[in-house]
Amino acid sequence: MKFTKRTILLLSGGTLLAVGIAACNHGIHFGTPEERGDWMVEKVTKELELNTTQQTNLSEVKDEFLELRKTMRSGREQHRADILVMLQQPTLDRNKANEIVSYHVDTINTRSPAIIDAIGNFYDSLDNEQRAELRELMEHKMEHHRHRWN
């Protein structure tokens, strides 16, 4: 076998291996919301080296967000049907559109104090080093998100 053929085969094999590993690594983006939440709690616990109390506080944050998600999605099918009906009319039913938006805004306004308290309890339980590491992680994620969407 010539050197160039061997090189091409090795590069192709390496590329396939890298793509396969990358595909397996992104599997967390799938699954149930509970599974994704558990994965995130495990990741943050490992990254920040959380103790049991901090881990409990973080789980409360996860639970609050999952409950908000469930509440927000509860009327989803009916809202979709209402929107489709509105789009078939010659004029937009502004009152109905405002009702749908108000439902979501009211749900967020109702649930936000509990979510903020859960986040505050988690953040307050961190020591200074963990807070600094959390800030660094959040800045990195925000910067990555900004570049991704700009």
Image (cartoon, rainbow, N blue to C red):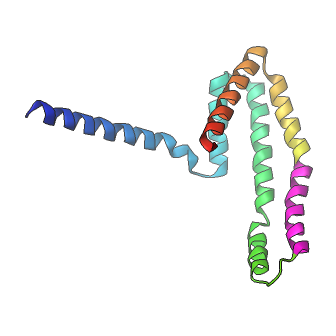
Q: Is residue 110 magenta?
A: yes
At x 56%, y 50%, the residue is 30
Q: Is residue 32 magenta?
A: no
The quarter of the displayed image where residue 20 is located: top left
Range drawn in magenta: 94-111
Give the side of residue 101 with respect to residue 34, left or right. right
Q: Position of residue 34 (x, y in %)?
A: 67, 48
Q: Is residue 2 above or below residue 136?
A: below
Q: Position of residue 122 (x, y in %)?
A: 81, 29
The quarter of the displayed image where residue 129 is located: top right
At x 62%, y 34%, the residue is 144
Furthest residue in direction top, as rendered: 129
Question: How many numbered badges does the structure rendering display?
Answer: 0
In the image shown, does 73 or 137 lie closer to the viewer?
A: 137
**Quarter of the rendering occupied by the N terminus:** top left
In the image shown, does 16 or 24 lie closer to the viewer?
A: 16
At x 73%, y 77%, the residue is 84
The quarter of the displayed image where residue 9 is located: top left
Mostly what secondary structure, the magenta segment? Answer: helix
Give the side of residue 117 with respect to residue 8, left or right. right
Q: Position of residue 148 (x, y in %)?
A: 60, 41
At x 73%, y 19%, the residue is 132
Furthest residue in direction left, as rendered: 1
Q: Position of residue 116 (x, y in %)?
A: 87, 38
**Quarter of the rendering occupied by the C terminus:** top right
